[in-house]
């Protein structure tokens, strides 16, 4: 059934349809519409779940660590400062191999206070052992959230469904909402192999000496690797029932492209328009959208990018002292190819600044004109920033 | 009051606690009172080690080890999941040290009991961060040496009154207990087990390693803490109804302090001042309770 809804409400619909049993959350803008709608579902009896209104994000995830270990399907949502506050327990959830699903609304980190979109919050959690799936529109948000539960419970790892603040979380779009029967065919009830159970008492997460710790960590990497293999299989099942699929990456006109743009999130939609306009002028531009960031689909990325002369990565995020995070990962994926494209990094749209068609067109033009990329990624649309040194010196 | 301890034990005979560890004794009594239908949460504390390394465990109940500050929040989630699964007869208990309760876990604990989550929170209190090597906590008593309050910087602040803080949340049940009074301890655990909502038991658990006492004095020191009024045994129901469970002999605090290396730097003047502080706290408790037991 088609409905017009916000990206936030698309998440909530998926949580309802997935029959989540325990939800735990703490409010932060711009995540609030997700948890408010889920609260309404619970209050109206449309979702038979326990909603834990805890006193912090840290406790929100801690409570789900308890609930998931006790054997029920769990969900939380957060953003920015809240995700940063959860950091310790992000590691815990993956280390404990718990299939917790989280909606994470990309918002800039303070200071200065900024509630608008920016990917640095989720990308700075890239080493925590969570699968990360980035979404482009409301339909993808709903579908990806449903897929997240199946993937998490298949490989025993937590999954983060990532959506841009406001551009996606608060934007109304037509979304096709599947029926309960369709969802039930795709997503079986949660039935873990191990859980807290007084009939068969076990100790979970106990002291692990150097003799066993490395093997425990390796098993997490094995699970990550299996997620890369299983995601397309899961999408096959999803497509059979729902008629839609997204791919770990999606290519647009890359086969004969000289320059390929690499994007994630809502910037992708703007880039699609730019690519179409430039193609209409006969310019060989392509687009690669990265949806799955962890595990990183390096092989698929190599397959689509290797024939291009130049790749332009748009990063709505930054790792200080290094560069754009997607650009780093793309360079690493390509570095062992004998003939590889040159990778140009562009920093765009931090803290919710608009990434317009004109800006993306300018990025294409710069990439064409330059023979080689600069050492550092280029910050697009900056006004002049004077460098302020500290008072200590040699 | 005499309580029959059950024949079965829910602790195996081996554990990796120090000799004379009060927390090991406290766990044994706790499990005696709780029985098998128990799920336990252990945030970082001495017991993260005492329970044994993977793949061994000294406990015969299911245990979820978790991060330092999450004891109450994890229990909240387990309770919710067990309720959803229809396992209402299982008691969820958090077992945390004073650091995980008074300090780093206090926000989660306050949040959970404000929501009146249905679980039992037990703090075994050895009055410092003992597992990391005797660092000061907000439970460390006035006058104590620790490795972060050495020399002239011995602790000059009072111990946080955790039971009063919990009682202020108007939870159904809060109580103190001591490893020197096992009948009283087990009776309180059984009483707590029979109540729904948030329940809190604060167990005084002596630490020979951190307190600089011979291991064979562990129980005696705990008994003296009660008899000097330093650690009175009492209950608070609904946050307001106080019951003192044992009439202490009222020994002078210096008899308790002089047995422990952690207080060896204190002067007679210091001890007189501490005596006054203990009497002041005791008077306050008596005023709240209204009566004394006639035992």
Image (cartoon, rainbow, N blue to C red):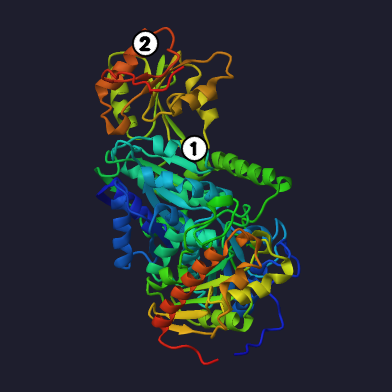
Which numbered disc flags the more N-terminal residue, 1 or 2?
1
- As measured in the structure, the alpha-carbon distance from the residue carrying label 1 to the one carrying label 2 is 31 Å
Whether residue A343 is situated above or below residue B83 in the rendered picture: above
Residue A180, percent from left and from top: 38, 59
| Quarter occupied by residue A218 | top right
Query: Can residue A85 be seen in the rendering of this structure?
Result: yes
**On the rendered image, what quadrant is the C terminus of chain B found in?**
bottom right
Q: Secondary structure at mark 2?
A: helix
The residue lying toward the viewer, choosing from B33 and A180, is B33
Q: What residue is at 52 percent from the left and 24 percent from the top?
A: A303
| Quarter occupied by residue A247 | top left
Q: Residues within 10 Å of mark 1 (few under 14, many from 20)?
A: some
Q: Are marks 1 and 2 on the same chain?
A: yes
Q: What residue is at 63 percent from the left and 87 percent from the top?
A: B3
The residue mark sitting in front, 1 or 2, is 1
The residue lying toward the viewer, choosing from A96 and B255, is B255
Numbered disc 2: what chain? A
Residue found farthest to the front: B269
The residue lying toward the viewer, choosing from B64 and B127, is B127
**On the rendered image, what quadrant is the N terminus of chain B found in?**
bottom right
Q: Secondary structure at mark 1?
A: loop
- Label 1 belongs to which residue? A126
Q: What residue is at 71 percent from the left and 80 percent from the top?
A: B8
The residue lying toward the viewer, choosing from A316 and B7, is B7
Residue A350, percent from left and from top: 32, 30
Query: Can residue B36 be seen in the rendering of this structure?
Result: no
Numbered disc 1: what chain? A
- Label 2 belongs to which residue? A368
């Amino acid at each position: 059934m088609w409905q017009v809804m916000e990206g936030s409400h698309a998440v909530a619909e998926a949580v309802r349809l997935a029959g989540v049993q325990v939800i735990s959350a703490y409010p932060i803008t711009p995540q609030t519409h997700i948890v408010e709608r889920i609260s309404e579902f619970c209050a109206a009896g449309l979702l038979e779940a326990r909603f834990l209104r805890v006193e912090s994000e840290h406790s929100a995830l801690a409570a789900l660590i308890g609930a998931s270990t006790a054997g029920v399907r769990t969900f939380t949502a957060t953003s920015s400062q809240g995700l940063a506050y959860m950091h310790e327990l992000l590691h815990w959830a993956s280390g404990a191999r718990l299939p917790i699903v989280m909606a994470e609304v990309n918002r800039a980190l303070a200071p200065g206070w900024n509630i608008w979109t920016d990917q640095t919050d989720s990308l700075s959690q890239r080493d925590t052992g969570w699968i990360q799936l980035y979404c482009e529109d409301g339909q993808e948000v709903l579908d990806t959230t449903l897929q997240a539960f199946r993937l998490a419970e298949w490989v025993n790892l937590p999954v983060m469904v990532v959506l841009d603040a406001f551009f996606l979380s608060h934007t109304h779009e037509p979304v096709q909402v599947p029926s309960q029967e369709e969802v039930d065919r795709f997503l079986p009830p949660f039935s873990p192999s191990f859980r807290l159970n007084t009939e068969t008492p076990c100790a979970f997460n106990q002291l692990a000496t150097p003799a066993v710790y490395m093997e425990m960590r390796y098993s997490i990497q094995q699970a990550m690797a299996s997620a890369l293999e299983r995601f397309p299989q899961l999408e096959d099942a999803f497509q059979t029932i729902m008629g839609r699929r997204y791919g770990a990456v999606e290519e647009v006109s890359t086969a004969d492209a000289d320059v390929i743009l690499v994007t994630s999130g809502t910037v992708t939609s703007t880039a699609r328009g730019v690519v179409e306009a430039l193609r209409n002028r006969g310019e060989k531009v392509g687009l690669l959208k990265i949806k799955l960031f962890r595990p990183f689909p390096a092989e698929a990325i190599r397959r689509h990018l290797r024939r291009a002369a130049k790749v332009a990565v748009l990063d709505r995020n930054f790792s200080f002292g290094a560069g754009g995070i997607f650009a780093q990962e793309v360079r690493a994926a390509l570095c062992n190819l004998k003939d590889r494209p040159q990778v140009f990094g562009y920093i765009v749209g931090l803290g919710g600044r608009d990434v317009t068609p004109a800006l993306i067109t300018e990025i294409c033009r710069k990439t064409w004109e330059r023979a080689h990329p600069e050492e550092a990624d280029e910050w697009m649309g900056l006004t002049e920033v004077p460098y302020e040194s500290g008072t200590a010196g040699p | 009051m005499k309580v029959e301890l059950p024949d079965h034990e829910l602790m195996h005979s081996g554990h990796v606690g120090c000799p004379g560890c009060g927390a090991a004794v406290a766990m044994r009594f706790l499990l005696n009172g709780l029985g098998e239908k128990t799920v336990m949460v252990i945030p970082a504390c001495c017991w993260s080690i005492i329970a044994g390394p993977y793949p061994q465990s000294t406990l015969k109940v299911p245990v979820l080890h978790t991060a330092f500050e999450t004891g109450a929040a994890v229990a909240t989630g387990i309770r919710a999941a067990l309720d959803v699964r229809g396992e209402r007869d299982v008691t969820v208990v958090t077992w945390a040290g004073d650091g995980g309760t008074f300090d780093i876990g206090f926000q989660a604990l306050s949040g959970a009991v404000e929501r009146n989550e249905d679980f039992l929170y037990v703090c075994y209190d050895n009055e410092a961060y003992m597992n990391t090597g005797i660092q000061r906590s907000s439970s460390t008593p006035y006058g104590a040496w620790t490795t972060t309050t050495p020399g002239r910087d011995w602790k000059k602040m009072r111990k946080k009154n955790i039971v009063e803080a919990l009682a202020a949340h108007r939870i159904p049940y809060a109580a103190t207990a001591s490893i020197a009074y096992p009948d009283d301890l087990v009776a309180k655990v059984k009483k707590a087990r029979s109540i729904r909502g948030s329940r809190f038991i604060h167990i005084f658990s002596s630490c020979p390693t951190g307190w600089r006492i011979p291991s064979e004095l562990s129980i005696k020191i705990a008994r003296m803490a009660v008899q000097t009024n330093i650690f009175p045994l009492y209950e608070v129901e609904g946050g307001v109804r106080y019951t003192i469970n044992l009439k202490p002999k009222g020994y002078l605090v210096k008899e308790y302090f002089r047995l422990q290396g952690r207080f060896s730097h204190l002067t007679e003047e210091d001890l007189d001042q501490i005596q006054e502080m203990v009497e002041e706290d005791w008077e306050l408790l008596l005023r709240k309770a209204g009566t004394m037991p006639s035992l």
